[in-house]
Amino acid sequence: MSTKRRKVIAGNWKMNMTPSEAKELVKNIYAEVKGTKHCDVVVCVPAIDIPAVAQAVRGTCVKLGAQNVHFAEKGAYTGEISANMLKDCGVEYVIVGHSERRQYFGETDETVNKRAKAALDAGLTAIICVGEQLWERECGITAEIVSRQTKLALYDVPAEQLAKVIIAYEPVWAIGTGKTATDEQADEVCGIIRQVIADKYGKDAAKKIVIQYGGSMNAKNAAGLLSMANIDGGLIGGASLKPADFAVIVKAAQ
């Protein structure tokens, strides 16, 4: 398959950084990655940090992402944020269905699909997360789990919206644990996801879709993971809070 896909390195800050800290961090990140042309650099920040970071990244190569989105346009959903609200604040990307959302906040395959469609309908790029738990991998059902999650997330998503879809493979057992899938394990599963896209949308769509790896990618292991044929970037957790480490990952995307 073609490897001419543009890589995307996205930092997921999770629940870290006050607005003033966020502004400082993104300035330091930009100082490390300015001039980057070979890949897209995204920071997905807590909702309360969005206005401050939007201001700080204006006119830079760093793009702004959110960590979640609600599926309704508006209404009685206390505490939630719609896709249009995000867009109006300058957000371009949004993470959908992160394993922590599934684990702690009752996110289901159905709500992941609804949120993804809401994001895409608003013109946002949806970073849709899929991945198996440790016992599922040990049971040998990784392929079934990620295939099912990918199919359900993309239910009723038309082919013309696929250009705004990124799939992030994040093995749940490798998030925040320091464990990482081997380069070959990660590439194999990203290849399985790509085959699901080929079956649903055709080979051309499968060649074009960006698939990230999101299980504890860091400055030390990024080069190996990003050299794999099916891995087109990373969804970075802890390392995205360290400007120098994040920059090493961005450079490795070359």
Image: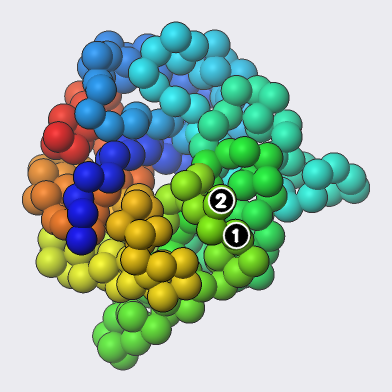
Where residue 52 sits, quadrant-wise, is top right
The residue pinned by badge 1 equals 158
Q: Residues within 10 Å of mark 1 (few under 14, many from 20)?
A: few
**Residue plotted at (11% across, 44% down):** 223
Where residue 35 appears, as percent x and y from the top left, is 24, 14
Q: Is residue 77 above or below residue 131?
A: above
The residue pinned by badge 2 equals 161
Q: How crowded is mark 2: few (under 14 residues within 10 Å), some or many (20 or more)?
A: few
Where residue 62 sits, quadrant-wise, is top left
Nearer to us in this view, 70 or 78: 70
**Residue plotted at (57% across, 29% down):** 91
On the picture, is 196 further left or further right than 118? left
Quadrant location, the N terminus: bottom left
Q: Is residue 106 above or below residue 147?
A: above
Residue 171 seen in this snapshot? no
**Residue plotted at (65% across, 54% down):** 117
Mark 1 in CB contact with mark 2 (< 8 angstroms): yes
Q: Is residue 145 above or below residue 85?
A: below
On the picture, is 199 further left or further right than 6? right
Q: What residue type is labelled 2?
A: Gln
- How many numbered callouts? 2
Question: What secondary structure is marked by label 1?
Answer: loop
Q: What residue type is labelled 1?
A: Pro
